[in-house]
Amino acid sequence: MITTLAGTETCPKCGAATVSIREALPWCAGCEWNLDGYDRARQAPELGWSWIDRRTHRLAARLTRQQYAALVGRPLESAGWSLAGALTVGISVLLLAGVLALAVTGVWLLFAYPFPNFAVVLGLAFIGLALALRPRFGRVPPDVDVLTRAEAPELHALVEEVATRIGAPVPQVLGVDNDLNAYATAVGLRRRRLLCLGLPLWGALDGPARVALLGHELGHFVNGDVRRGPLTQPALTMLGSAADLFRPAPGTHDAGFIVLIGEWLGRMVSWALSRLLFVGHLALAATALRGSQRAEYLADEMAARAAGTAGATRLLDVLLSTESVALVVRQAARGGRGPAAWRAGTARSLAAAVDRLPLVRQLSVREEMSLFATHPPAGLRHRMLAARSWQDPAVVLTEARAERIDAELVRHYERAGRIAAWES
């Protein structure tokens, strides 16, 4: 419900009445005064101390606004390497070199001195640490149902058509799961491209939004997203893994005084080292994710190129309304109805919220602002697309073709519906 706080509070910059929805901190819808303000009651703590969270939110707001201003007036595909991306790659290379040095030193210590000796213990410790910190390349998640071309020829054909239109490579693995989400990534040493479509989301989207979703996710294969590069993943994961590794374990209670003193000193050293590594992890994540947010803007541009600006912005509005979409899917599934009912319910929900959506987009700018967010606020993403040249759809998904695709997925829809129906 929208509450316009006319007469209660006015904007100190332009004098207009402030607005609020969802009991959020009021802001000015016209000049956006106070939209970047920290709303402690509605925003989850990130570092645990409100005075630090307030400052990190302020820094995130400044960086996010600066990035938006730098990108809104230029071709996104020609932005090139960012400083954050280059720094992330450099740090990843150093971390990988450090892990390799640990492993080599460990092996050398095993054979450098006559056995037995303390160097063997130290060597094994180095090798174990190198194994614990090694980069992980991932695999196809067990909850993903891989769809072969024989099982889903229409869906494969649509994915290939969208990929061709936006100049992206075709995924080597196409799958579905039961989440209200979709993602593209690379898995394994061979870095196989994986596209996974969450069926509650896919089934709730109309034709243009489906094409936009494919354009956005396939765009991640060509937009330089730091989260998906084999040379950048170590910077985003290794220090966090090391911090977990050195986190102090629970101590004993029945040991003697000397043992307790030793344990206490060991825990202090482990805690300090773990916190230091964690701070480094946060600093790297905050730096690298600037590049990730830039990649999301480019993926949105790919979505608009495939589905047109209208389809891409509609997709963003659906993603802003995931709670409503989840409710629609759950209620329809409990009534034994499938994706056609999911789409109809989502369309009705968006139509009912048409007057509220501009404020929801604005509020997302505040509530999705974070140093550690992988995506820019949905409101800024919508604004970025609206500010750029209008694009007509390059791929049109007709109702008949969408029905054929849904028929290929009927068994998977039934399972996704059963899971959604049981969710509270």
Image (tube, rainbow, N blue to C red):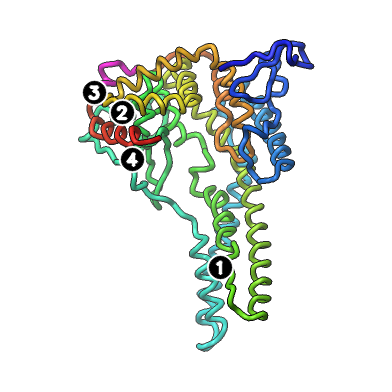
405 and 180: which is toward the camera: 180
Give the residues drawn in magenta, as a range.
395-406
Q: Quadrant of the C terminus?
A: top left
Disc 4: which residue:
172
In three-dimensional space, the C-alpha distance between marks 2 and 3, rounded to whole angstroms, equals 24 Å
In three-dimensional space, the C-alpha distance between marks 1 and 2, rounded to whole angstroms, equals 55 Å
In this view, which residue lies farthest toward the right?
Answer: 12
Residue 241 in the image: x percent, y percent? 54, 57
Which amino acid does the dot numbered 4 rest on? Gln
Q: Are marks 4 and 3 in contact (CB under 8 Å)?
A: no
On the rendered structure, is 335 left or right of 162? Answer: left
Disc 2: which residue:
334
Which amino acid does the dot numbered 3 rest on? Arg
Disc 3: which residue:
404
In three-dimensional space, the C-alpha distance between marks 4 and 1, rounded to whole angstroms, equals 35 Å
Q: Quadrant of residue 379?
A: top right
Name the mark nearer the viewer: 2 or 3: 2
Label 4 or label 3, whichever comes before in sequence order: 4
Disc 1: which residue:
102
Report the residue at 42% width, 44% height from top. 186
Q: Are marks 4 and 1 in contact (CB under 8 Å)?
A: no
The local crowd at label 3, few if under 14, some if 14 to 19, many if 20 or more residues have their Cα within 10 Å, is some
Which amino acid does the dot numbered 1 rest on? Leu
